[in-house]
């Protein structure tokens, strides 16, 4: 079972937007200041952007094109040079792969306070977060 199928089996997901093309995925890989784990591409390569609920909080995982657009619009790399935003919580926070205080992993930080020192570590990977549930309790508490 691939990662997207695991997510679909665990959560009720909603699809929207466009499917990430090979071209947009390659563009994102060259745009990103960090190596984006394959798990992210396993989600976006064959699906539109996805949205689902964790407890009461939304998760929107962006397409490659949206990822680039959002990182540029919010100047993510200006404030977090070793990070790439890949998703949001439908409110005020962004999820990103970054090198932070606990090393490389999945972090959350407020859009209006993009500061490496304000990032909150969730899990070492998106798979650990979504499938194993590591860091979901922290994610739910972040407002």
Image: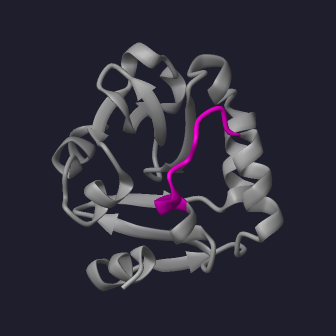
Q: Residue at 74% across / 36% down in the picture?
A: 73
The answer to whether 32 appears left or right of 10 in the picture is: right
Quarter of the C terminus within the rendering: top left
Asked if the magenta segment contains residue 34, the reply would be: yes
- Quadrant of the rendered structure where residue 48 is? bottom right
The answer to whether 141 appears left or right of 100 in the picture is: left
Taken as a whole, is the magenta stretch helix, strand or loop?
A: loop
Quarter of the N terminus within the rendering: bottom left
Closer-to-camera residue (98/75): 98
Closer-to-camera residue (19/15): 19
94 in relation to 131, above or below? above
Q: How many marks?
A: 0
* Residue 67: % across, % down: 66, 50
* Residue 10: % across, % down: 27, 79
- Quadrant of the rendered structure where residue 109 is? top left
Q: Residue at 59% across / 69% down in the picture?
A: 44
Asked if the magenta segment contains residue 71, the reply would be: no
Q: Residue at 22% across / 63% down in the picture?
A: 55
Q: Residue at 69% across / 58% down in the picture?
A: 64
* Residue 62: % across, % down: 60, 59
Q: Which residues are magenta?
A: 32-40
């Amino acid at each position: 079972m691939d990662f997207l199928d695991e997510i679909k089996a665990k959560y009720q997901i909603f699809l929207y937007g466009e499917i990430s093309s090979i071209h947009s995925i390659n563009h994102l890989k060259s745009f990103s200041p960090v190596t984006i784990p394959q798990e992210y591409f396993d989600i976006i390569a064959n699906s539109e952007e996805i949205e689902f609920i964790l407890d009461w909080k939304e998760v929107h995982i962006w397409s490659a094109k949206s990822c680039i657009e959002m990182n540029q619009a919010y100047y993510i790399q200006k404030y977090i040079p070793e990070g790439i935003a890949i998703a949001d919580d439908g409110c005020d926070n962004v999820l990103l792969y970054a090198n932070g205080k606990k090393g490389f992993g999945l972090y959350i930080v407020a859009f209006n306070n993009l500061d490496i020192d304000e990032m909150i570590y969730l899990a070492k990977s998106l798979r650990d977060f979504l499938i194993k549930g590591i860091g979901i309790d922290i994610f739910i508490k972040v407002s």
